Amino acid sequence: MCGIFGYCGQQRAAPIIIEGLKRLEYRGYDSFGIAVADRNITVRKKEGRISQGMPNIPRLKGTTGIGHTRWATHGIPSDGNAHPHLDCHGAIAVVHNGIIQNYASLKRELEERGHTFSSDTDTEVIPHLLEEEFKGDLAAAVAAILPRLEGSYAILAIAEGHREIIAARCRSPLVLGIGDRASLAASDVNPLLEHTERVIFLEDGDIAAMSAEKIRIWHEGTPVERPVSRIDWSVEEVKKGGFPHYMLKEIYEQPEVFSSTIRALKEEEPPEIVNGIRGVTIVACGTSYHAALLFRYLVEAHCGFPARVELASEFKYTSPPKGDLVIGVSQSGETADTLAAIQKASMSGHPTLAVTNVLGSTITRIADDTLFMRAGPEISVAATKSFIAELAVFSHLVDLMSGGVLGKDLPRVHLAISEALLVDLSPAVELCRDAGSMFFVGRGPYFPLALEGALKMKEITYIHAEGYAAGEIKHGPFALLSAETPVVALCPPDDAYPVMFSNIREMKARGTPMIVVGVSGNRDLRDVADVFISLPEGSSLFHILGSTTVMQLLAYRTAVALGRDIDQPRNLAKSVTVE
Ligand code: G6P
């Protein structure tokens, strides 16, 4: 939800910032901008995507600069609302990720004191506040105004004639990079990897002054040292590697992601926090929520205690049972709703565990303990390999909490994904591409998978798709079934098979085109289906992973057929850092 990038070094800042912003574009892509400080500040900003380019930016002089790629919250996407924003004299420039909740009253005050605003954004109050405090020391001015800001922010600020970037964070991600005679700042580590593997994760309340030579950090006015972390993700991992889209690359990485996550977790000490627990509540959003729903089935089937799953955004209206371990699942570790839920759980005395993909992310600091998935950088907005990595973490946890019930399966189960990558989906894509509306149905653990299949389909093809528990489809959705409403039915050979088979026939009797995912050799399913997608036989987890991959690829191939913008679907952002 907005990406920010700053560079202060020996080279021209502008081209470096542009490349950095391109790697952050998945966080927001409705407009972008850059400011470079030389004797004066020069700003270039524009509605649209940075990848569509803007002539002349790379030629800007100046070795200190900041940039921003936006996902609009306050004010429509437009040239004027794009960041950076300036004070009245154009002498201070600011980029910001987050939301200043009290901006309206601050803006009124500032206008009464004669400031002129040129955007509808909340951010613009920051440079105007800085203008009032700036007496030559920008870090001091930032420290003076931060207590007035309510909400969340990661801020980068520059001033004309100064070769320094001032960075501050509060509940929005910000990482600093230590380069070769350069300092960098970004919303996540991906764009820093080109320059350095040494990074510093700022804490909430930190202010940093970054120059080409050094980084100084203060917390509540006192100088502090923050640890320097080494990131072992490679630059190659954040590039497309010959695939037409990141999403496809990330789907193909899944077998390795599952097995390396399991391998790495097995080598670690099991988190003490799971010892002796009698119940879990899992909180998450989007795809991570679907992975959590699936976890619930595994826990209740194998561990003998209850598991509740809550949408993180709804968690504040509920109360988990006393003593429950509260697990927050977030690929990015920065989703505001999930962070708020974990914070609430901690404050009400629950032990908390984070499951995330990102070292140093905010959730790792809020939760008592963390389990890392090993998905590597996920760039496509539609989450795929992180879902598989979350399933790997959950499988490992279930194994730990059940005394090893899945153990034998885990080293081989990722082969299901490799098999699913080979399936020919062309007939299914033909059925989906012209659909106005679709349903995905399943029972038991395949119900959350149906939700996830529908989410993938809607977010990248823009076809309206709903996931349903197969048993519920006759309680309403039947009214919508027609020859124009294909249904994807997940029908593995498990206990639910007989009733699932009946559900498929009932839907088929309404003239609905049926795409059925089952195991090879099942003649009954082949006969009833319009398109039968067969997967090899295997354990339940094996079939779950295979079915997931089929649905991801079905959404992907349909989106390709429709010519959609796959990695950056309209209106979405990869990391939603506002509640
Ligand atoms: C956004 C993304 C989804 C993601 C969700 C939760 O909505 O577009 O793909 O599943 O956030 O993200 P998290 O990083 O918390 O898993």
Image: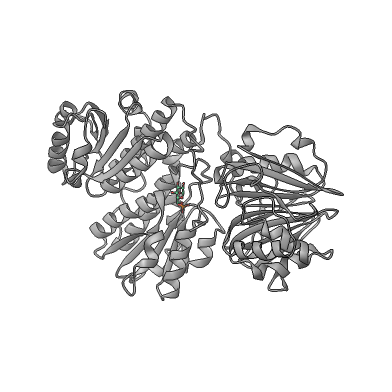
Count of all numbered marks drawn on residues in the image: 0
Q: How is the image coloured?
A: one colour
- Residue at the spot x=26%, y=45% of the render? 468
Please state the horizontal and vertical placement of residue 527, each as a whole percent of the image.
Answer: 16, 26
Please state the horizontal and vertical placement of residue 464, each as a whole percent of the image.
Answer: 35, 37
Examine the rendering and report whether any part of residue 504 can be seen: yes
Depth check, front residue: 409 or 557: 557
Answer above or below: position of 516 versus 305: above
- Residue at the spot x=55%, y=29% of the render? 242
- Residue at the spot x=28%, y=59% of the render? 299
Please state the horizontal and vertical placement of residue 552, each as a whole percent of the image.
Answer: 38, 37
Please state the horizontal and vertical placement of residue 477, each as a whole percent of the image.
Answer: 22, 42
Say whether residue 65 is left or right of residue 521.
right
Depth check, front residue: 486 or 7: 486
Say whether residue 112 is left or right of residue 480.
right
- Residue at the spot x=29%, y=70% of the render? 278
Say whether residue 350 is left or right of residue 58.
left
Examine the rendering and report whether any part of residue 227 can be seen: no
Say whether residue 557 is left or right of residue 515.
right
Q: Residue 123 sits in which quadrant? A: bottom right
